[in-house]
Each structure stands twice: as structure tokens, then as C-alpha cells.
Amino acid sequence: MTRIAQVSDLHFGSEDPATTESLLHFLNRLKLDLVILSGDLTLAAKHDEFARARAFIDRLHAPTLSVPGNHDLTPWNIPERMLRPYRRWHRYVGEELEPSWFGPDVAVVGLNTARRMRLKLDWSHGSLSRTQINRLGERFRGAKPGAFRIVVAHHPFLDEEGADLANRPKAIVHRADKALDAFVTQRVDLVTAGHLHRTYAAAFQTEAGQSAVVAEAGEPAHKVTVIQAGTALSSRTRDEANSFNLIEIEGGRLEVHPITWTGAAWRRADAALVAIARPSAMAA
Ligand SMILES: [Fe+2]
Ligand SMILES: [Fe+2]
């Protein structure tokens, strides 16, 4: 079995030390193949916050794949933000802003949606460039045939279905529609994101008129599932407990199980939030 944890919005700077220790031990006991850190590792991109994030990464037994969030660019030092926005990220987290990881049955590709500035007042919003979207096929070139394909980003691509969005911040990443079409073309199975500090799943299904890409090609419908993770450590939990997502892949089946902090322990949900089966595996 391949086991991957998606741990998001750690926000070092607002973490509880006891919960941090507990999370570290819990993750290491899971014997993970990979830990995805989907952005907002810090609260305000301060050096001591990044140093605590680095110490956390160093104590994980599994390799990590990290993409920046909007909180990981300094909001205080504007010259640094404009000229060298990822200086602190490179120093403490890694050289790459968009790393990839290839396992026997899964390919994971990171996309950086954080921006130093936007032509809007709110710089917390995320964006993808056309180049990032167009390069996706090339990025998945190392994937094994039949492997599940996962994209990691910080900002969300789909709203929660049926939710009252009137009181929620609008946070869908710029060019989400174009990116979702590209995910269909590239047969991406799962998109993991954070930023909202809420756990939910949503699906982008290609039906007539919804995706010109697939309608023209006449290929069978492909469903892209999006999972949002809560904040794993931050006290800025909004109305949810701290949590992370566990992704398990075995025998052509991928499941996502949210794991929630009860205040004393990490508890796995009984039912999978998401279950995706390969058609060939279903027929076997
Ligand atoms: Fe966040
Ligand atoms: Fe964020």
C-alpha cells in the first residue's frame, strides 16, 4: 500500500506545541511514503516560524513535497516580497517551488498558486499562469502507466457543493476553469488543496458542454476529485477541529480518510471521504 498524508496550513506561529508533538508522532507511526505540505507553513513568513516548520519537516520520517501558500511570502518586508519573494522559502524549505514525486502507483505534481502581488487589493488570492497549466503534461511525463495522478496546490479549485458561500471568503484560484480542463486532459484523479481551513470533497465531471476539451476528443468522461484539507495545527481553525487527510492507494483503489484532532488524539473517520477506483481494477 502507498500511504500519503496531506498536511495543510500548519501556520507555525499559531501552533500549539502539544498538538505539534502529537501530530509528528502520529504521522511517523503511519509509516508514510510521502507527506504533502500544501502551503501556509507559517503565519507571517517570519524567520522563527520558518525555522519551526523546518524542524518539523526534519523530524518527519517520510519525504515531503511542499508548495508555498500566501502566508509564506513576507507581508512586512515589501522590497523583499517584490524582489525575492521566495528567499525564505528557499532558505528553510527547499529550492523547488513546484516539486514532483513519482511512486509505483501514484504520481504527485506540485503547483505554486501563491503570488507576490495581484492586480487586486487582496494579495492572499491565488493564481495559475497559462505556462503552469500548459506544462502539466510535461510534468506528468515521469508517471508510471496506470498510476493515479495527484496535483498539489495551496488555493482551492472548487467551492463546496451545497454550502452557503455568502459568509465565506471567495478564494477560488484564478484560471481554475482552465486548470480543471487541463486536469481532465491529463487524467488527473485527485487535486489536494488547502487555504480555507475546511475539509470537503468536490468533483469536476466532464459532461456535454462542461468541458470542450473532452467533448471534442469524444473520450469517455473523466472525473477530477478535489479534496480540501483543514488546518493541521493552527489555532485559526474557523469552525472545524485541526485535521489532515490520509490518502491510501492499493490494488487500483485510492481512498482519502480525514483524520481529526479530538483535543487528545488523532481520530480517523470511519468512512472514506473520497474513493476512486481504476476501471480496469473494478473489472478485475
Ligand atoms: Fe491558511
Ligand atoms: Fe492560505
Image: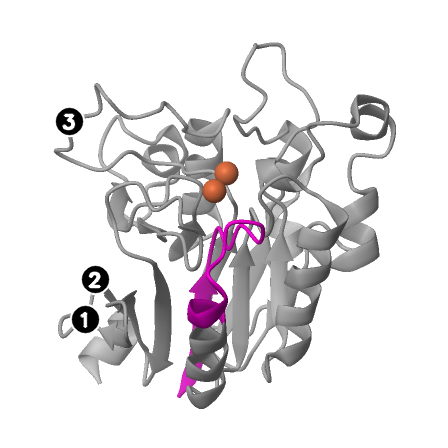
Magenta segment boundaries in residue numbering: 1-20
Task: Please provide percent x and percent y for residue 101.
Answer: 62, 69
Q: Nearer the viewer, mark 3 or mark 2?
A: 3
Q: Residue at x 22, y 36 (%)?
A: 207
Label 3: state its secondary structure: loop
Give the labeled residue for mark 1. 269
Q: Amino acid at mark 1?
A: Ala
Q: Is residue 238 left or right of residue 72?
A: left
Q: Relative to 143, does residue 15 appear above or below in the rendering?
A: above
> Do the residues under discs 1 and 2 have CB atoms within 8 angstroms?
yes
Q: Residue at x 81, y 52 (%)?
A: 90
| Residue 5 shows in this picture | no
Q: Which mark is residue 164?
A: 3
Q: Is residue 128 left or right of residue 22?
A: right
Give the labeled residue for mark 2. 273
Q: Amino acid at mark 3?
A: Asp
Q: Residue at x 84, y 30 (%)?
A: 80
| Residue 88 shows in this picture | yes
Question: Quadrant of the rendered structure where residue 53 is?
Answer: bottom right
Q: Amino acid at mark 2?
A: Leu
Question: Quadrant of the rendered structure where residue 254 is?
Answer: bottom left
Q: CA distance from mark 3 to mark 2?
A: 20 Å
Q: Residue at x 78, y 41 (%)?
A: 86
Residue 173 or 234: which is nearer the viewer?
Answer: 234
Q: Nearer the viewer, mark 1 or mark 2?
A: 1
Whether 17 is among the magenta residues is yes
Label 2: state its secondary structure: loop
